[in-house]
Amino acid sequence: MRRKGFVAALLLCILLAVPSVTGAVYPTVPAQTSIKVQVNGKPLSLSTPVFVENKTTMVPLREVAEALHAQVSWNKANNSQNTVTLSRGDRSSTLTLGSKLMKAKGRSVNLDVAPLSRGNLTYVPLRALSESLGTVVAWDGINKVIRIDDPTQLPIVGTTKKLNELIKQMETFNGYYLGGVIAESGGAAVTTDSKDTSPAAPSEESAGGSGDYSQTNIQVAGVDEADWAKTDGRFIYQLSGSRVFIADISNPPAPKLAETLEYGPDEGFSPQEMYVDNKRLIVIGQNNTVIPIQVDPAKPSVGGSGSSSDSKMSILPTNAIRSSVQTKIYELSDSGKPKLVRETKLEGGYVSSRKIDSSLYIITNKYNNFSYPAIRTESNGNTSGSGDATSQYEPLFSDSGSSVDLRKLPLDQIRYFPESPDNSTLLIGALDLDRPDQDIQVSAYLGSGQTIYASAKHLYVAIAKYLPKGDGYSQVTQVYKFRLDQGNIVYIGEGSVPGTVLNQYAMDEHGGYLRIATTNGDMRASGAARSSNNLYVLDEQMKTVGTLENLAPGERIYSTRFLGGRAYMVTFRNVDPLFAIDLRNPLKPAVLGQLKIPGYSDYLHPYDDNHIIGFGKETVEVPSKGAGADETMAFYQGMKIALFDVSDVSQPKEKFKEVIGDRGTGSELLSNPKALLFSKSKGLLAFPVELMEIKNKEAIEPGGFPAYGQFTYQGAYVYRIDLETGFNLRGRITHLTQDDLLKSGQYGFDYNKSVRRILYSGDTLYTLSESMLKANDLQSLSARGSLNYPASPEIRYKTDPGSPSITPLPASR
């Protein structure tokens, strides 16, 4: 009997959440009398139980509307259709019996199940309707409760006094001195923003196979990510320094430059990434403006009295840099000459962005320079000052759709993450691109954002915290959840898990659950401080409901990939364990199997349901000098690609592998999966490679320190991939001439000719560098045409021997 109850709860948990990526069809589920509904914590008494149809929970309209205090208005003018509008505060939704289209906030929303009539009652989809009216819906699978609540809110900063309190607290939370507090007593605080330095799709469509042209390799299908280059099949759009080139590829043998968008030094705009759809080109970049600071020589102190004894600082810089993320939105035309129609600015350094249909979300971190402590406390314990410092702290934004003037977000509209270790301010700008008359919606949170993951419906912001614990510290990741609400942001809640995340691929949302992989501890330590790797499952309320801990002690996570009901995790120290993890029961994640092989994978990409492609480095073990007889150290070698067979998840196998070059060989793909081009249907795999080779391997002493190779090549490696023969190198395409190669050094070459992206459109493969575009036949790889871009005044060479492609492994060299 208890087993039946568990199965029913687990089934409904899946039914209430995001549709399964497997595309399974569920039959209509009878009324579940054991399921309860709560509205703002109070039980909702329904005249008839809820029922589930096509993974959608249906409830009586009138009773739910009354519980939400929504006004109901029927329109029965047309006898063939019954339309109802529900209004709650500033939100309204319109539904029609038998129609899967709901109108909410002036936009059409597709429903999985249409409203229907049974007897004298009208049933509507619970989640879609409730959320359209501004509530938060969550399924509590353990207690079998559907919870409908008004959004909770993070606390507001509000006043300068509160801001100073929070800054002081941050010094303690991170275990070291972060700087002072904002000046409140005469004189202006200085804010110098800098670019954020935080560590920044399973389907073929997301990896480059929709229609007859490739798309950016993204993490989540339907959630677009900005990239250095894009194509819409007619044109290729790419960055080159401070310019955007738009190349007409309608005639592949003779590609031509349709337009150049050039941003001069006076504008202060540096493009970084872009989006392209069938209507628009969106260019996102950094805008840095120098702001002169006026210093009164008669008042060298920022304490307000003119005496340096009243302040901890007596000298201010004369200039500050205001850094903003600028978004330029262009209207596309058949000529390839876009028209600028809108610009926005959001103060801070660029963290990330996402585009879902016509909704654009931009995330920045505003760095707050609190390193000039200058608070002045009067004898009564109160703070005093002119408020100029508060004005310096308040973030700026603008939207040309309403006004080009910069506006400040006041303290009473800025919230904070409690006990955050980071004194930056996270800003989220939300735009509905189909509504140019609707102003950018800006949300601000003191406490920064470090790792960003977005599903089709939610944005997750992860913040690493290191908390004092005895003589050491404990590692915790705090995760804040927001709903992406058609160009708006709704805060949902927060949760925390032990350890820290590697990157966005360490997080995934499936079936309403957040799955997150972390490494906790130090892989160089021993005993309780030694590292372990863990996986946690959080429910819709951000409560941890599933735990799998202590995987590969003494190692750390190098890559993670979640695919439906499974997760694949690669850890490394001396060998590479690939773990296959079962997540079908989110309450009890379990290891299905593991494979231990030399090397490691920095990125995992799905080939199909039973095969995974790994991209990383080959490694070699050598005896560790001065250690025990069995002690070894691992050194990475050339770049490694591997095809793993997980048909039998209890025994994963490395079916094929390919090693490219020698020690030092690398690829942008290893740190940025957007550099990958993959199409299973075309048997196509391509990515850029910087090749390092050892010319005289015979001279290397066996067992000695592995030697670095010398630079010999950079360009696209194009493979044919299938399950019968594995990886077959079809050819290489470079933009470097023989003269360029002769001029190259041990590590450096003309970086402007470095191939960064490989795209295809129709039967043509395109390779892109900052200097040129090359067109090759997709089947034979024979040259078809090329386009040399106008020379850039910025000539850059990659000469740093400490670059990521040749940096020793963090743990094992």
Image (cartoon, grey):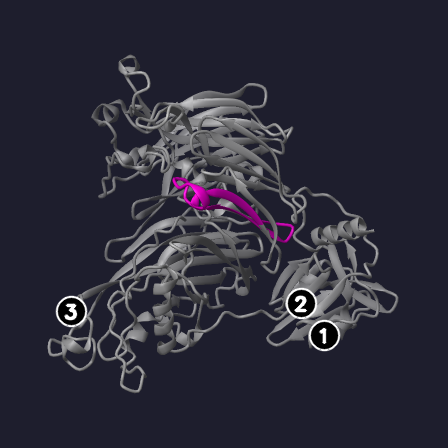
As measured in the structure, the alpha-carbon distance from the residue carrying label 3 to the one carrying label 1 is 60 Å
Q: Residue at x 31, y 83 (%)?
A: 381
Q: Residue furthest left?
A: 297
Find out whether residue 694 is within the magenta segment. Answer: no
SS at mark 2 in the image: strand
Precedes in sequence: disc 3 or disc 1: 1
Residue 52 placement (x, y as % from top left): 78, 56
**Any mark on residue 380, and which?**
none
- Which residue position is annotated with label 2? 148
Precedes in sequence: disc 1 or disc 2: 1
Precedes in sequence: disc 3 or disc 2: 2
Find out whether residue 534 is within the magenta segment. Answer: yes
Foreground: disc 3 or disc 1: 3
- Which residue position is annotated with label 1? 67
Residue 160 placement (x, y as % from top left): 35, 77
> Which image quarter holds the C terminus?
top left
Q: Is residue 413 visible?
A: yes
Residue 101 placement (x, y as % from top left): 69, 60
Looking at the image, residue 443 sits to the left or right of residue 565; the answer is left
Mark 3–mark 2 contact, CB under 8 Å? no
Badge 1 amino acid: Ala
Residue 11 placement (x, y as % from top left): 74, 50
Q: Which residues are magenta?
A: 509-536
**Any mark on residue 315, and which?**
3
SS at mark 3 in the image: loop
Q: Residue at x 39, y 62 (%)?
A: 173
Q: Residue at x 77, y 47 (%)?
A: 26
